[in-house]
Image: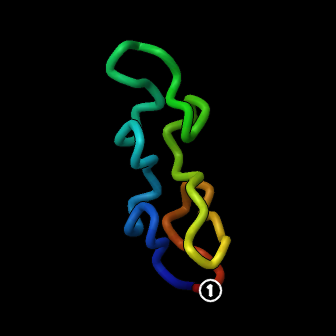
Amino acid sequence: MEVCPSCKGSGKCQGCDGTGKLSDGSDCKMCYGSGKCSEKTPAGYRCHGTGEVAKI
């Protein structure tokens, strides 16, 4: 397993810092309110909040 480059291994969504909410109180559009990293890596993988991807 490799560290997810999108969240740098934290598993937190970078758009809302893992809170699931934006500053205006609405759900984060990147993670749909989950707070988990769901951003695709350059190779097309997602960690889904684990902080690790299969390979990069």
Amino acid on which the number 1 mark rests in the picture? Lys
Which x, y percent locates residue 28? Answer: 50, 29
Badge 1 element: loop
Task: Please say if 54 is above or below 52.
Answer: below
Q: Residues within 10 Å of mark 1 (few under 14, many from 20)?
A: few
Residue at (52%, 52%) from the top-left corner? 37
**Screen quadrant of the N terminus:** bottom right
Q: Quadrant of the rendered structure where residue 8 is?
A: bottom left
Identify residue for label 1. 55
Q: Is residue 33 left or right of residue 44?
A: left
Q: Is residue 11 left or right of residue 29?
A: left
Task: Please say if 40 is above or below 54.
Answer: above
Q: Is residue 13 left or right of residue 39?
A: left
Residue situated furthest front in the rendering: 42
Which x, y percent locates residue 36? Answer: 53, 46
Residue at (43%, 25%) from the top-left corner? 21
Total tally of numbered discs in the picture:
1
**Screen quadrant of the C terminus:** bottom right
Residue at (49%, 38%) from the top-left corner? 35
Task: Please say if 42 is above or below 55.
Answer: above
Residue at (59%, 75%) from the top-left corner? 53
Which x, y percent locates residue 4? Answer: 49, 72
Which x, y percent locates residue 20? Answer: 47, 30
Q: Quadrant of the rendered structure where residue 55 is?
A: bottom right
Coloring basis for residues = rainbow
